[in-house]
Amino acid sequence: MNNSYSKSILTSYLRTFLQIAFAIFLTPYILQYISKSEYGTYSLAQSTIVLLGLINFGFGGALNVFVSRNTDDTTLVSNYASITATFQIILGILGLILGLFLSFNFSDWFKIDSASNFQIQWVIILFSLGFFITMISQTYTSLLTAYRQIHIDNLIGIITMIVNSIFIICFLYLGMGILGMAIAVLITQSLSSFLSIYRVKKYLPNLKINYFTIDIVRFKELFKLGIWFFIGTISVFIIEKFDQILTGKIVNIETVAILIITAKLFELVRGLIYSISNNLRPYIGKMVGAGEVLKAYDYYVLLRKVSILAATISACVIIYLNKIFVETWVGAEFYGGDLLTIALGFNLIYYCWKLPTRAFLTSNLVVKEQSLYGVGEGIINLMVSYLLGLKYGVIGIISGTFISGFIFQLIINGSLLNNKKLESWSVYINKNVQLLFQSILLIGFSVFMTMYFPANIDHLGLLIIKFIAFIIGLFSSLLLFNIKDFKLLYFIKIKPVLFK
């Protein structure tokens, strides 16, 4: 475990840092060749195609759980993988057909007149082809994760990220615009799929994936668990991915571009924090499968504390620096304002807050309840965001996620943990309410600094002094509020247990 987990963490961080570097470099380059409206259209098309992922019926998630718990039984894993691969192909074809239909109606649905209808149609078609290819390889990606070969998946991601960036630069230089960017995505998705399939065949030579060969008993097992992953995916999409679509419908396409740029640092940091939970998830599943539930609970508590700490500190720093970052990076016209930044900061904390609990509950096969409650949360989030969006625009849309989500998650997750005897409901509520209060105070400190001691790049020396003072004040606040759950020494105490 020591070696593979360390590789997973290191390659995840490398992948995330490179993602940040490429995003910071590529975005201003891209905006030299396409307009704000075209950038918003392209991003909105990507978000909409993600909808096609809802038709996978959760087979990939179910495969990950069953394989991680039965890695020593190659025959059983082969049966699970064959069933999943078969249905991924069928569903990929269905998604491709839906994408082709969407390509003829996309411009009308979002009232887009900033790019040619021909270009938009082909962008949607190319994204749909990419979805089909991704569905074919998803079984192999899930196998790499379940066998704790996450570092291989990360290395594949790094390679394709570099290739994608090169193609985007070249195609934009040749004047191909958003169509060239979509072609670059399709090429890199094809490369990523090929590498994933090749790596699984090399790492697991005894694994036999037989397409269109279905074991009815294993199919029922996958379907019974997968359907709840499918329902859960719907809620996750509504909660985390619907902001751009709502913004495109309620506000306008240009505001979609502003939202994406203003949220860029939050998205990049969220990926970094997510990697902590995603890398540890298969290990927790393995422990639970081996009957070591108490040990898995220790990891869950660790994940919750580290995730909240990382998200809160990151949100505070980004709130303070986001305005100067965006204006220096791509220009003041792309900054959505301080209120939008604050709302995005709370959403970052919320997203990272719930992920460890979801991982722990899923490892204990508490999928059905999470999924059902998640759909309810997603519907409430959509309604609140829509109503707030009508009145307050994009700020209302973003604020609706945190306002509706945190209270819902606090009650539901606490109840699930308590009912499954995984954690006392009162302990969960007390700890999380305390952490919420402390996070609000820290965000408040960041807002105070932004209002009265704003970062300003006009004088670099003064900016450095202000930022140092901000960091000192931030960590002094941690001590002032006596946030014992944020002690990094806790990680040092548990770390020897982690690597046994």
Image (spheres, rainbow, N blue to C red):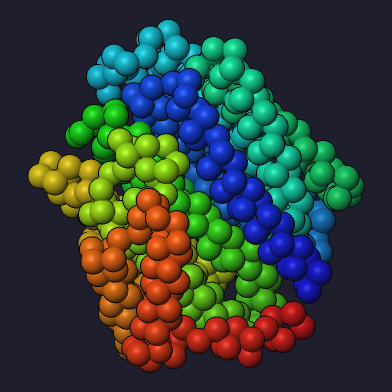
Q: Residue at x 39, y 72 (%)?
A: 470
Q: Residue at x 28, y 44 (%)?
A: 336
Looking at the rendering, which quadrant does residue 168 occupy? Answer: top right
Q: Residue at x 59, y 17 (%)?
A: 173
Q: Residue at x 19, y 34 (%)?
A: 250
Using the image as rendered, state which of residue 401 and residue 461 is in the foreground.
461
Q: Is residue 405 above or below residue 110?
A: below
Using the image as rendered, state which of residue 183 and residue 278 is in the foreground.
183
Using the image as rendered, state which of residue 173 and residue 117 is in the foreground.
173
Which part of the image, by quadrant, shows the C terminus?
A: bottom right
Q: Is residue 306 above or below residue 102?
A: below
Which part of the image, by quadrant, shows the N terminus?
A: bottom right
Q: Is residue 351 above or below residue 140?
A: below
Residue 441 visible within the image:
yes
**Measured from the top left, where is residue 191 in percent x and y?**
72, 31
**Measured from the top left, where is residue 61 in percent x and y?**
57, 53
Residue 293 visible within the image:
no
**Measured from the top left, where is residue 322 in percent x and y?**
38, 53
413 vs 76, left or right, is left
308 vs 243, left or right, is right
Instruction: Looking at this view, name the residue that lies furthest to the left.
Output: 391
**Exactly how many numbered labels are in the figure?**
0
Q: Is residue 377 above or below residue 327?
A: below
**Measured from the top left, where is residue 144 in percent x and y?**
73, 52
